């Protein structure tokens, strides 16, 4: 009898951009049992085709608390285990709100805070 491997639900942001689409394609090449949920500010036919489910961000500023509430609700609704930011604005938003996601069911793919802060300054990098 083979042991059944649990499926991992992954949220990829910025799926309308090439990096977000590349992340989905790379995840698909693994042999891991994944369910991929895409997120972007606009609907994109290709991104919707690549992901198992696709959502459009609400028309709010990414810096607003409304975006935080939206993300937290999406994580719970879709039972997201892993969040992979596919665009810079989401990377820094998730970095700035790390504490708000600390109790979340999902792990956020982020580098160490000091490295992300260094990355904001291209000259210092």
Image (cartoon, rainbow, N blue to C red):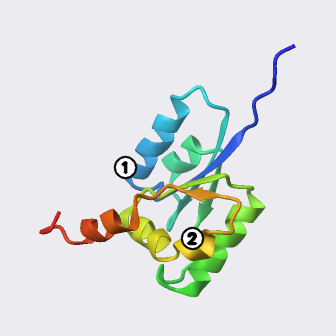
Q: Residues within 10 Å of mark 1 (few under 14, many from 20)?
A: few
Query: At 73% from the left edge and 38% from the top edge, which residue is drawn?
Result: 7
Q: Quadrant of residue 91?
A: bottom left
Q: Earlier in the sequence, mark 1 or mark 2?
A: 1
Q: Residue furthest right?
A: 1
Q: Position of residue 70 (x, y in %)?
A: 65, 75
Residue shown at the point (54%, 29%) measured from the top left:
30
The quarter of the displayed image where residue 119 is located: bottom left
Give the structural element (helix, strand or loop) at label 2: loop
Q: Which residue is mark 2?
A: 57
Whether 18 is drawn above or below 58: the answer is above
Residue 47 x, y percent position in the rendering: 51, 49
Q: Secondary structure at mark 1?
A: helix
User: As drawn, is 115 to the left or to the right of 20?
Assistant: left
| Residue 16: % across, % down | 45, 56
Which residue is denoted by mark 1 in the rendering? Answer: 18
Residue 95 numbered tag: none
Classify residue 116 as left or right of residue 33. Answer: left
Residue lying at the far left of the rendered structure: 123
Mark 2 surroundings within 10 Å by alpha-carbon count, few (fewer than 14), some (14 through 19), many (20 or more)? some
Asked if the residue at tag 2 contacts the one at tag 1, i.e. Cβ–Cβ closer than 8 Å, the answer is: no
Cα distance between the residues tagged 1 and 2: 17 Å
Residue at 60% from the left image edge and 84% from the top image edge: 66
- Image point (33%, 68%), residue name: 114
Left or right: residue 19 versus residue 3 is: left
Residue 48 position in % (x across, y down): 57, 49
Image position of 29 (left or right of 102) = left
């Amino acid at each position: 009898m083979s042991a059944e491997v649990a499926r991992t639900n992954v949220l990829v942001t910025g799926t309308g951009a090439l990096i977000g689409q590349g992340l989905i394609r790379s995840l698909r090449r693994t042999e891991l049992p994944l369910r991929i949920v895409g997120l972007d500010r606009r609907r994109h036919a290709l991104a919707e085709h690549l992901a198992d489910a696709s959502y459009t961000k609400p028309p709010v500023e990414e810096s607003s608390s409304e975006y935080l509430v939206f993300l937290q609700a999406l994580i719970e609704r879709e039972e997201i285990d892993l969040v992979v930011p596919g665009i810079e604005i989401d990377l820094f938003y998730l970095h700035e709100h790390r504490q708000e996601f600390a109790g979340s069911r999902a792990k956020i793919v982020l580098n160490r805070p000091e490295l992300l802060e260094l990355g904001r300054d291209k000259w210092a990098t």
